[in-house]
Amino acid sequence: MTQTKGKLSNWTKKLVIFIAFLTTITLIFSTILGYKRFSEVFNEHFSSPLYHLRTISEATNKNVCVKLLEEVNAKYKYLGNRNYSDNEVCQIVDAVKFSGTIKSKLTSPVITSCITAVQLSRWLNELGAKSVEHIGSYNCRKIRNSQKLSEHSFGKAIDISKLDDSVLKDHWNDSGAKGEKLRKAAKLACKYFTNVLTPDSNSLHKDHFHFDNKAGLYTRWHYWFGCK
Ligand SMILES: [Zn+2]
């Protein structure tokens, strides 16, 4: 009896500590971000990391991959697992040849992982761009100035240089409609990709967006602090 009571109070203690922890985190974030921004992030994106992880883990077999691609009106050819490099690590799991969606067309098809094709389609469906120019997805290489492999090595990243008539290297800081379209596209990408790099991120990205689907929660920091 005493033991059960002891256990219960132990759990109660843990629950109180957990609630206090959540409250502290909420207060810290509200203070840093401002309440308005905090509630915006909370409402729009709180569930995103779990959502991302779920979709990433789901899209690892042909049936699920194809079902997801059909749902988002993607234009694709399923290729299966592929490795176009001589490095055995650089494999694309569930590769697809992706050429856009019913409404948005890539200027040339790209071979990418299933999950990246799905998230690109979702982003394009919401954005409504008709034409997308890219500078590639799969590329077995390290991140520049780093020893880590880039997500390009797994076909989980894409570099985009132009949306309709908005060119990254020319219009990113444009105050008119062309610049507006690019900035809106980048912000929206934070909803579908775990990592979003723009000309504001660093000089390596002055002429293209880099979007990737690296699995992980920490990349949401991009949305909260870097990706506006
Ligand atoms: Zn890139």
Image (cartoon, grey):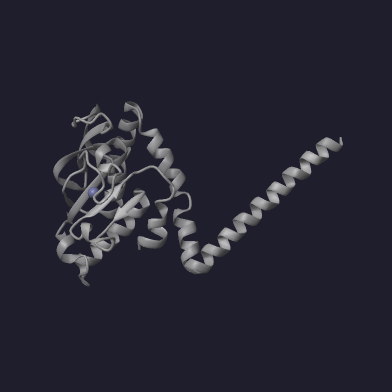
List the single residue furthest toward the right. 1
Residue 214 point in image, percent of width and height: 35, 43
Residue drawn at x 50%, y 62% is 39
Residue 213 point in image, percent of width and height: 33, 44
Whether residue 226 sits left or right of residue 169 in the image: it is right
Count of marks overlaid on the render: 0
Residue 217, compared with residue 222, is above or below; it is above
Question: Which image quadrant for residue 55?
Answer: top left
List the single residue furthest toward the bottom. 175
Question: Which image quadrant for residue 151?
Answer: top left
Residue drawn at x 14%, y 60% is 165
Residue 180 point in image, percent of width and height: 25, 66
Q: Tell which of 158 and 125 is nearer to you.
A: 158
Which quarter of the rendered picture does the N terminus lie within? top right
Q: Tell which of 55 and 127 is nearer to you.
A: 55
Residue 185 point in image, percent of width and height: 28, 58
Question: Which image quadrant for residue 80?
Answer: top left
Residue drawn at x 28%, y 45% is 120
Residue 98, compared with residue 178, is above or below; it is above
Which quarter of the rendered picture does the C terminus lie within? bottom left
